[in-house]
Image (cartoon, grey):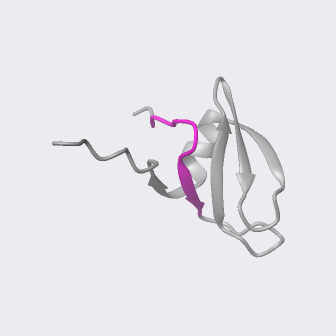
Amino acid sequence: MVVEFHLGDALTLRKAHPCGGKAWRVERLGADIGIRCLTCGHYLLTSRRKLERAVKEHAHPAAAPEAP
């Protein structure tokens, strides 16, 4: 099953970054996906398959509420 990633998605990875942070944000899409650590700002480019296995929680950005 292919996981759908979108720009701005918030990710929580299984292993912590050396800075101690587990929260990341998707910044680039393609065969490789670019993510940025929200604790220290480090940018990481990783394969889609490797990222799919490393993700513990995946939250899509909040959509704008529709006006009635």
Quarter of the image where the N terminus is located: top left
Judge left or right: residue 19 versus residue 3.
right
What's the residue at 71%, 62% (across, down)? Answer: 38
Q: Which residues are magenta?
A: 3-13
Q: How many marks?
A: 0
Residue 61 position within the rendered picture, expressed as x and y whole percent measured from the top left? 46, 48
Establish if 43 lies above or below 45: below
Q: Residue furthest front?
A: 68
Q: Residue furthest left?
A: 68
The secondary structure that dominates the magenta segment is loop
Residue 64 position within the rendered picture, expressed as x and y whole percent measured from the top left? 36, 44
Establish if 55 lies above or below 14: above
What's the residue at 47%, 53% (across, down)? Answer: 58
Q: Nearer the viewer, residue 26 or 46?
A: 26
Q: Nearer the viewer, residue 65 or 1?
A: 65
Residue 4 position within the rendered picture, expressed as x and y whole percent measured from the top left? 45, 34
Residue 24 position within the rendered picture, expressed as x and y whole percent measured from the top left? 65, 56
